[in-house]
Amino acid sequence: MTRLWLIFAQTATVCLAALFVVATLKPEWLPAKGMGEIVPVLQAPQPAAPASPAAPAAGTRADSYHDAVVKAMPSVVGIVTSKEVRAPRNPFLSDPALRRFFGDRFGDEAQKATSLGSGVIVSTAGYILTNNHVVEAADEIEVALPDGKKLVAKVVGNDPDTDLAVLRVQGGNLRAISFGSSEALRVGDVVLAIGNPFGFGQTVTSGIVSALGRSGLGINTFENFIQTDAAINPGNSGGALVDSRGNLVGINTAIFSGTGGSMGIGFAMPVSTAKMVLEQIIKSGAVTRGWIGVELQPLTPALAESFKLATPEGVIFGGVLRGGPAEKAGARPGDVLLAIDGRPVANPQGVLDIVAGMEPGRSATLKVSRRGELVELQMTVGRRPKPQSRVE
């Protein structure tokens, strides 16, 4: 009996040691460690044809978006965050002689810094979407519901690459917003921005979609912004951009401004991206993206001529990370990437988006031009590391 017990104990010890080594060196081999919770969202039905002005319903006005506001406003919350900062006192009071006799009472003074933002209730289970920069490094997060009730919120997870974060609150009369379709938006469509500008409380502004697919702004790693002229001011970050039916189409993220106030150029992250981030964070606590380990440079006409390319199409590998997926596949600095799995690439952002959408561990084919010759490289996609550099 003693011998059997020793065999069991040794086997258990070896298994635990193996699990520790795998979890430390190859965590991707293990199944995702998430809450495993699937949170349904309210998806608004899509019209069979592009939206067009329709006759107003009885009792409504053709020039009003009151119904859309009434539908969406109960799902938009105000967010107040606070964190402790150390404010230095007068330098004279930091004199070593004073510290020797009086200790640190004349040292730096702890103060609480507060900031304002907005959020959108996306599930009656208490999940709220907002911007990562609204809650980043916050010690305390308080959510103000439309009915005046205030709840303490916790960060479920964040995604700095898209500047999105998911919070959760417990209790309260929560009303989830209906998700619209950002893919169905057209330039010129009416949109409404709902948020908590300057801490005034819920405010609605209106405008139109000024542009779609805005990128290269240097705001996020992954950029596919909806541009709007609906007024977005400080405190609106993380709030809702809704269509004329009151369905969520974007999360208000940033403005272009020389004064700090609205100048008619605002940017919102599309709801399609926000939904993907929401689902992954709730499922596993983080967002997983593909990665190939290269530095990308745009291909200009002059460079295309020097690389003996007929047209300036593709992206240059400015650098290849040693030991990364691309380097293992045989990629070299100076290669011109033309396509990934048959999908042509035109700029670095396009490559970033395609690779990020690939599941780590899957195989992919890179079509590159090397000294005028076409080469195909077979590669295994890696897992994108946490954002620390501009390496893709």
Image (cartoon, rainbow, N blue to C red):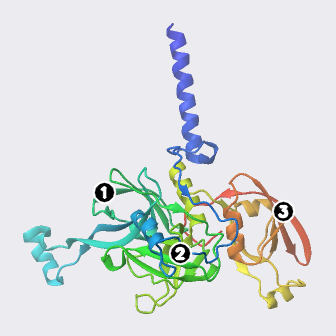
Where 154 falls versus 84 (above or below)? above
In terms of depth relative to the viewer, which is nearer, 382 or 113?
A: 113
Q: Can residue 129 be seen in the rendering of this structure?
A: yes
Q: Can residue 214 be seen in the rendering of this structure?
A: no
Which residue is painted at 53% across and 77% down in the image? 191
Q: Residue furthest front?
A: 58
Quadrant of the image for the C terminus? Answer: bottom right
x, y (%) of residue 245? 53, 69
In terms of depth relative to the viewer, which is nearer, 329 or 102?
A: 329
Which residue is painted at 53% across and 11% down in the image? 3
Disc number lying in front (3 or 1): 1
Kind of residue sitting beneath label 3: Leu
Quick check: marks 3 and 1 in contact, CB under 8 Å? no
Instruction: Calculate the distance from the C-alpha at mark 3 to the C-alpha at mark 1.
Output: 51 Å
Q: Residue furthest left?
A: 101
The label shown at residue 377 is 3
Instruction: Calculate the distance from the C-alpha at mark 1 to the C-alpha at mark 2.
Output: 26 Å
Q: Residues within 10 Å of mark 1 (few under 14, many from 20)?
A: some
Residue located beneath label 1 in the image? 152
Residue located beneath label 2 in the image? 268
Kind of residue sitting beneath label 1: Val
Label 3 or label 1, whichever comes before in sequence order? 1
* Mark 2 element type: strand
In terms of depth relative to the viewer, which is nearer, 65 or 108?
A: 65
Q: Residues within 10 Å of mark 3 (few under 14, many from 20)?
A: some
